Image (cartoon, grey):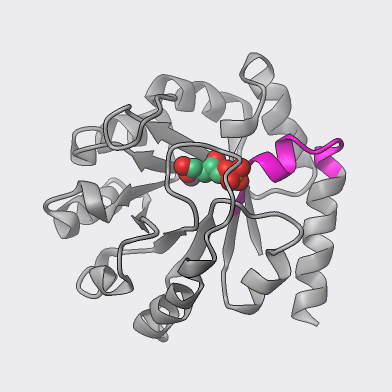
Amino acid sequence: MILAPSILSADFSHLADDVEKVVSAGAQWIHIDVMDGHFVPNITIGPVVVRHIRRITNAYLDCHLMISKPDRYIDAFADAGADGITIHTETCTHLHRTLSRIRELGLKSGVSLNPSTPASSIEYILDVTDLILIMSVNPGFGGQSFINAVLPKIKKVKDLISEKDILVQIDGGVGTDNLGMLLGLGINVIVAGSSIFNSVDPESTIKEMFSIAAANES
Ligand code: DX5
Ligand code: ZN
């Protein structure tokens, strides 16, 4: 399991401390939610914050762009130090071209599907994609409930990927209660925001998540 804590639920006045805390507890990735107030009804952070996070950690910076026309900002996030950029299929007219550009810049390319977007939307871009992000909430906010209706989409995406070297990530409403079930369905990368940062002890929550993953593997 790759664990990607979402800093959307971190304390932004102590962001470096929160990043270091989850990385030292074992999280390999930091999930950075970028929102523009247009594609989603919330506004968060841009490349300048990514640049500062890059200075304080070697963890993989997983940038989830919930913005319209993301092709305008790919170079800026790459320049800021992102390791991977995930864009939404609903926002991008020339999806194949934009994913190719992410790879050209030496980054991992990801494509995200809203809960209502069918798995078939990724069928023709798999040759330029390193990661498929299945949204299990409507993007825009942390702390929402997991939408169970997306569960059948996981198998459909896995079937489309087949033997290709592409990670499957899930984002929204994930915690210790449903983690084992999601790993059992073949999810590789877990995003978790509020279930980690709003817990009493984020480090022990992360350790519990890795124990669940270890139990799932055995
Ligand atoms: C939602 C974001 C998520 C969010 C998840 O639009 O993409 O990454 O932070 O938050 P939780 O884990 O609290 O549902
Ligand atoms: Zn996200």
Tell me where residue 185 sits by quadrant: bottom right
In the orientation shown, which residue stands out farthest toward the left?
A: 94
Residue range of the region highlighted in magenta in the rendering: 191-203
Residue, x 44% and y 25% (percent of image)? 44
Q: Which residue corresponds to the image point at 78% horizontal and 40% vertical from the top-left?
A: 24
Q: Residue at x 50, y 57 (%)?
A: 136
Q: Which residue is the extreme one toward the top?
A: 13
- Give the position of the C terminus as an image quadrant: bottom right
The x and y percentages for residue 90 are 24, 52
For residue 201: magenta? yes
Relative placement, left or right, of 43 versus 200 is left
Quarter of the figure with residue 15: top right
Percent x, y for residue 65? 36, 40
> Can residue 94 be seen?
yes
Q: Is residue 29 visible?
A: no
Up the image or down, 107 lies above or below 8; here it is: below
**Image location (x, y in percent) of residue 200:** 86, 35
On screen, 78 above or below 192? above
Q: Image check: 8 left or right of 207?
A: left
> Is the residue 117 above or below the residue 156 in the image?
above
Looking at the rendering, in which quadrant would you find the N terminus? bottom right
Q: Position of residue 133 (x, y in %)?
A: 43, 59
| Number of disc labels | 0
> Residue at image x 75%, y 68%?
213
For ligand 1, the image quadrant comes to: top right
User: Which residue is at the front of the view, 132 or 40?
Assistant: 40
**Is residue 38 found left or right of 218 in the rendered image?**
left
> Looking at this view, is 207 or 141 the one in front?
141
